[in-house]
Amino acid sequence: MLFNGEGWGKSSAALGYAVRSAGHGWPTTFVQFVKGGAWNAAEAAVSATAGIRWPVFAPGLTWGAEDPRALCDRAWAAAVESLRSDPPGLVVLDEITHAVEHGWLEAATVAEEIRGRHPLTSVILTGREAPEPLCAVADTITGFTLVKHESKKGILDP
């Protein structure tokens, strides 16, 4: 699945699926490519009690890190480990489109690894502006459109 677009709620939707997966007792991993520990501390804490593996690679946002590519490499290694694991489960690659957009990861590499995953492992990709290889590998794409957002008043929406 691919949750794509400018609208908010993509990560939250993926988290809902992760909770459902963990509730069924399936191995579930949520890998974030842009947000660090402080960004989603509450979600990570609740996920831990639900049995969701939530590795943290940075305290804040990766693009503020000294070496965001190194953080992406660590996140990608955790993602690949989960994609190849047995037993199968759910792997969420949160904000992976941003990692691709910034050149930290190749879309073709991501698509190839998804195609080669354990056949019973489900994958959710999130982010804005998904490139064609990620769209092609997704069997379901849901678009998120930003219609109105309170904190944007006076900035993008007068």
Image (spheres, rainbow, N blue to C red):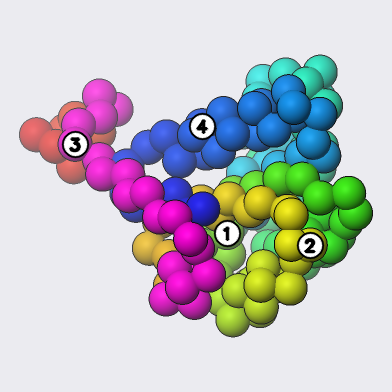
* Viewer-nearest residue: 14 or 122: 122
Residue 136 numbered mark, or none: none
Please identify the residue farthest to the front as the structure is shown: 120
The secondary structure type at the circle numbered 2 is: loop
Q: Which residue is mark 1?
A: 96
Dot 1 amino acid type: Ile
* Placement of 126 over or under 15, stated as above or below: below
Q: Earlier in the sequence, mark 3 or mark 2?
A: 2
* Amino acid type, mark 3: Val
**Mark 1 or 3 closer to N-term?**
1
Where disc 1 sits, the SS reads helix
* Residue at the farthest right position: 86
- The x, y position of residue 142, in whole percent, is 37, 49
Give the extent of the magenta segment.
Answer: 132-151
**Mark 3–mark 2 distance (CA, rounded to whole Å):** 37 Å
Q: Which residue is mark 2?
A: 118
Q: What residue is shown at x 81% (from left), y 50% (from top)? A: 88
Please identify the quarter of the rendering in which residue 68 is found.
bottom right
Mark 4 in CB contact with mark 2 (< 8 angstroms): no
Residue 67 lies in quadrant: bottom right
- State the image quarter where residue 109 is shown: bottom right
1 relative to 145 in the view: left or right: right
Q: Is residue 119 left or right of residue 101?
A: right
* Distance between the alpha carbons at the discs numbered 3 and 4: 17 Å
Would residue 15 be visible to someone looking at this image?
A: no
Kindly identify which numbered label has been placed on residue 12: 4
Q: Are marks 3 and 2 in contact (CB under 8 Å)?
A: no
Q: Earlier in the sequence, mark 2 or mark 1?
A: 1
Q: Any magenta on residue 14?
A: no
